Image: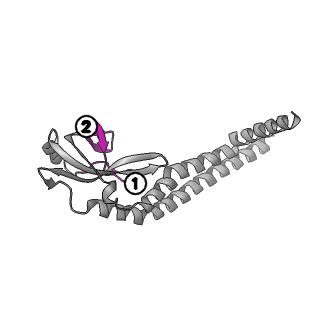
Amino acid sequence: MIARGGALQRLKRTLKKIGSKNGVRLMFLFIYVFGFAIPAGYAYFADYPAKDAIFTEVGTASFQYRMKRGYMLMVNGKDYSCESPYARSNPDCFTSLEEHQRLAGKTIFVDWFFQPVYPFVERRRVVDIRYDGKSQLPPHVLGRNLQWERENAQGRALFAFFGMFLGLLLVEWLGRMEKRSERKLS
């Protein structure tokens, strides 16, 4: 019983520490790991999917506008994206609105695969879109995009690490400046 009370006291002290300066550090670490490191790792290790991992969906195309990001392809109530899980770029597979207008309401074939974004979170990523038996995307677009993501993942993760590190140093410096000013006032 006594040992149990000691463990409870240690837990309380730990939680108090997390709520102070360590809480800010943990917040920066959490943002870096889940916002940059994990998606960068998935982008770096992503390969072109095997034939048995590519699925085909047939249905009527519609496009749903996503706030400040572009148009998401919708087929049978499911969304399909051409965006990188790391770059968080435009999910749109087409560069012009004419393509949306031309394909909206038409029956299309979407070849896609599940691409991991975070642990236990996957996105339906487009391999190809076919209408009237013709591909609507440039040849090898997915391969080029995966290669670009792989080449840039390390640099972006490193840049984000240094940005977060500088932010953490700034928070630490501001905390020390606040303590100095409190000492001078008392």
Look at 13% across and 44% down and name the residue there: 102
Depth check, front residue: 62 or 75: 75
Secondary structure beneath disc 2?
loop
Of labels 2 and 1, earlier in sequence is 2
Task: Name the residue that disc number 2 marks.
Answer: 76
Q: Is residue 80 magenta?
A: yes
- Vertical side of 11 occupied by 36: above or below: below
> Which residue in the structure is indicated by mark 1?
87
- Residue at 59%, 56% (x, y): give it: 165
Q: Is disc 1 placed on a helix, strand or loop?
A: loop
Vertical placement of residue 48 versus 58, above or below: below
- For the residues labelled 2 and 1, say whether their Cβ atoms are less than 8 Å apart: no
The boundaries of the magenta stretch are 64-93
Q: How many labels does the image show?
A: 2
Numbered mark located on residue 15 in the image: none
159 left or right, relative to 114: right
Answer with the quarter of the image where residue 136 lies.
bottom left
Q: How crowded is mark 2: few (under 14 residues within 10 Å), some or many (20 or more)?
A: few
Residue at the (11%, 50%) spot, across then down: 132
Front-lying residue, 82 or 135: 135
Report how far apart the C-alphas of labels 2 and 1 lie in the structure.
26 Å
Query: In the orientation shown, which residue stands out farthest toward the right?
Result: 2
